[in-house]
Structures are given as structure tokens and as C-alpha cells.
Amino acid sequence: MTLDTSPIAAIATAPGRGGIGVVRISGKNLWPVVQAICGKDEHSLTPRQATYLPFKRADGRAIDQGLAIYFKAPHSYTGEDVLELQGHGGPVVMQMLLARCLEAGVDIGLRLAEPGEFTQRAFLNDKLDLAQAEAVADLIEASTEAAAKSASESLSGAFSKVIHDLVNKVTNLRMLVEATLDFPEEEIDFLEQSDARGQLAAIRATLDDVFMHASQGALLRDGLNVVLAGKPNVGKSSLLNVLAGSDVAIVTPIAGTTRDKVTETIQIEGMPLNIIDTAGIREAGEDGSGPDEVERIGIERTWGEVSKADVILHMLDADRGPTLEDEKITERFPDGIPVIRIWNKIDRSGHKPAVDQMSDATHIYLSATDHLGIDLLRGELLRIAGWQQTVESRYLARERHLIALKAAREYLESAAAHASVDNQSSDQSLDLFAEELRLAQERLSSITGKFTPDDLLGVIFSRFCIGK
Ligand code: GDP
């Protein structure tokens, strides 16, 4: 990726009013801006030291007074020279200060920063690897304490370190194999003598462990997407309230419009679940009217959400038994997504709370209002998600990381097949063994940013907020 090194500026603090607001500039040489706004030069502004001064307009009058801090490259967040101006955190004063910076920086080509561009520079200047850069965004976006803790660990390099260690082990093994290929006479005994199989088995075991921790982290980051479907009055809202209310959950209704999907995020044993309410799915209004155009779009969108769900909860009335409407809803469920069929209102039907693993789905009998069998549902959701409460450290992994880890796992599995005892070490199988190791190494390295294509880097950084 080529680095556009023109200096960049942005307001680094959140929009709105606050005690302090920060404008940040990064680039190769920012002294002309410092001179114009702070009236200081290289000799009168000590790097990494806060200096209280007025931030001046072109006519010499002050926009605000505050702290100026200069970070000399490479000792800064981005690895370039960085100037931070800390003023009063009002939206207007911050905009004025930013505009003044751009004006004072015209000659050095100062421009507004793109989203994530400061962090992108930190990555390109080797201040952070890619997994750490992603952790910056994850830490900012973390909505639970556990997620923030994991993001912070990744940012400090804990996840990157386990990936590096794995890459090193794979590289060492690969070098061993390739050296042997250069000396064919020693090849026959190679697998035994170097215990290549043992080494590979150890690497695979470590990778499995990393994958488990990363999957747990991905769940912690993104939550399990659960769709709550069913015809009106079967008890969907009641169930949602029970699930949300009895946990120390942070319940955040995120509604687009009332006609759009509604997602509630709750927690079970620390695992976040995004429950998508499909209350809007209906064919006709209560007064007999059909859904209007806007509603129809909302309904289609909801079905779009259903196809992305991790689990579908299909709620039915145990007292009334299955109906044709229930059938219709079932027909629309996409293949391949686990369905839990919840028979609610057992307080009336006389069923006992139970879990029944049937061929079509898991059936659970419960009562939302009488709190019967709710733990059975909780347990089943945790089981389907593979959530392990006892796991201490989770890497706040992203889908991208999981895909790379999975691919590396498959390459190592193939490597193991080439090195198996049945597959006597022939020239060709050793070649293939080395090649699979190379591919595994490449995929693992992509997590921390080596061999990561430019367009992917672009996507990752564009999702950051401006000023970060
Ligand atoms: P929704 O339309 O599917 O969201 O259903 P609601 O949660 O609004 O419930 C519809 C009605 O069924 C309400 O009067 C609830 O009190 C009642 N209800 C919900 N769950 C139960 C249950 O487990 N037992 C009984 N007896 N009534 C229930």
C-alpha cells in the first residue's frame, strides 16, 4: 500500500460539547502550522511537553487558549510528526480551530483526514500491526466491559503475539523441510529424525486453542444473532422481557423506525445476544388491511435479517397447538440455520418444561409469564453458540481473523496428510508438505497485516471514525 504522506488534520474528540476538545495534525513537518497558530518554533516548543498558549487566527487574535503538544517522529501515534491542540470542547470552537489549521497548513498541503487515517499511518509506519489497529476501533466501539477488556489486550499485542509465535513455528518447520529438499540423500529419514510430525501436531494443537479463544472473542464482539419469529400473541415480547429482565443485562433497543427491524442486545452468562424482533412480519393488518409499501419494504428487510441469523427462535402457542400460520412462517426459514421451536404457555397446556431434540429442530416447552423452562432455553442458546463461560482470555477476533485461522487450520491438516506414515516421504509429498506450510504461514500472517491486500486494508480503515 502506498502511503500518501501529505499532512492530515481532524478533530480527534467526539462531536458535541465536552470539557476538552482536541484537534490533531500528523505529517512530515508541521512547523509552519505551529509557527502560525502557536507562535512557536522548533527551539521554543519542547516535544512531548504541554505548553499553554493562545491558538491564533491569521489576524493575531485568539480563537481559544489551550495546550499544544508536539510529538516528533517517530515517537508519536502515527510515527510521523504530530501536533495536538487541546482546547475547549465546543463544536463551534473546534470547527474554527480545525479550519484555522487547514488555512495555516495550505503551503504544506494540509488536508482533512479520512476515517481511520491516523491509525492507518500508524500501521504503515509499523507502530501497530493490523490486528492491533483493528483493536483500536474495537476498543472505541466496545459496548460491554468484557469486550473493552479483550480489545485492550489485543491492542497491547497479546493476540498478535500468539499469531507471531505460530507463524514462527510454522516458518521453522518449513525451513527444516526445505533444507531437506536441498539434500535429497537425507530426505528419507527426515520426518523421523526431526520429529516433523510431532512438531506439526503441536502447532495444530496450539492453532486449535487460538481458534477457540478467537471464536469466543468474535462472539463477545459481535454477539449471537437470534431471530424471534412467530405469529402475533404467542408471547414473543413476554419472552424477550424475561430473557432481558432476569440478567444484569444492558438492554439497548436499537430501532431504525418502528417499521424497521428492532434489535435488543441482552446477555446470557456474559454472552451478548442480538435479538431481532420480527413483530413486523405480517401479511395483513389487524383491521384486515394489507401492509402498505413502506411496511412491505420493512418486512422484506426483516426477512433479510432472518437469513443472516445464527439461530431462529420460532415461538408457538402450546395451548392452541400448531396452526397453518405457523407452517407458513416455518416455510420461510432459510436452510442451514438452527431452529429452536418454543412451545410457550405450558402453564395452560399442562406440558412440563422440557427440551426435546427432534429431527426438524430442538423443541423447548416453557412459559414466559410463569418463568417455567427459561433456563432450558438459555442453556440451549449457550450450547448452540459453543459459549464457554470459563474461558478467561478471549481475543476480540473479527470474522476476517476467524476465516484466516480456519484456512490455516485446513492447510496444516493437508500438511499432516502429506506427512502421514502411510504416505511414505517421497520427494513429491515433502514438496507438498512444504507448500501447505507456506500457505498456512501466509494466512496466519495476514492477520497481523503481512500479505494483506491493499483493498482489504482500505475497507478495514474506512470503518474507523474520523480523527482516529
Ligand atoms: P407477542 O405478540 O408474540 O409478542 O405476544 P405477547 O408477549 O404480547 O403476549 C401475548 C399475550 O399472551 C399476553 O396477554 C401475554 O400475557 C400472554 N402470554 C405470554 N406468555 C404467556 C405464557 O407463558 N402463559 C400465559 N398463560 N400467557 C402468556
Image (cartoon, rainbow, N blue to C red):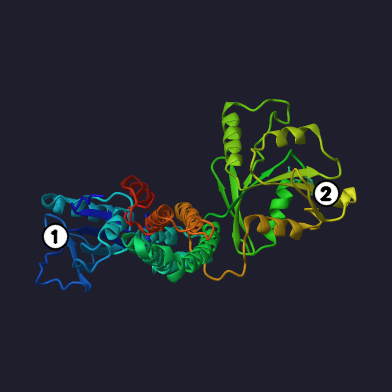
- The answer to the question of whether label 2 and label 1 lie on touching residues, with beta carbons closer than 8 A, is no
Task: Name the residue type under label 1.
Answer: Asn
Q: Can you say whether 408 is above or below 395 in the image? A: above
Quick one: SS at disc 1?
A: loop
What residue would you read off at disc 2? 345
Q: Is residue 361 left or right of residue 251?
A: right
Label 1 residue near ligand 1, CB within 8 Å: no
Residue at x 10%, y 67% (from the top left corner) = 41
Q: Is residue 70 left or right of residue 369?
A: left
Give the distance between the C-alpha atoms of the residues marked 2 and 1, in whole angstroms: 70 Å
Residue at x 61%, y 36% (from the top left corner) = 303
Task: Name the residue type under label 2.
Answer: Lys
Pointer 2 local density, CA inside 10 Å: few below 14, some 14–19, many at least 20: many
Q: Please identify the quarter of the rendering in which residue 304 is found.
A: top right
Which quadrant of the figure contains the C terminus? bottom left
Nearest the viewer among 367 and 219 is 219
Residue 184 x/y as whole percent: 35, 60
Q: Is residue 99 left or right of residue 447?
A: left
The extreme right residue here reads 350
Residue at x 15%, y 64% (from the top left corner) = 38
Residue at x 53%, y 62% (from the top left corner) = 208
Nearest the viewer among 287 and 310 is 310
Q: Please identify the quarter of the rendering in which residue 26 is found.
A: bottom left
Q: Earlier in the sequence, mark 2 or mark 1?
A: 1
Specify whether residue 251 is in view.
Answer: no
Q: Can you say whether 361 is above or below 467 in the image? A: above
Label 2 residue near ligand 1, CB within 8 Å: yes
Pointer 1 local density, CA inside 10 Å: few below 14, some 14–19, many at least 20: some
What residue would you read off at disc 1? 29
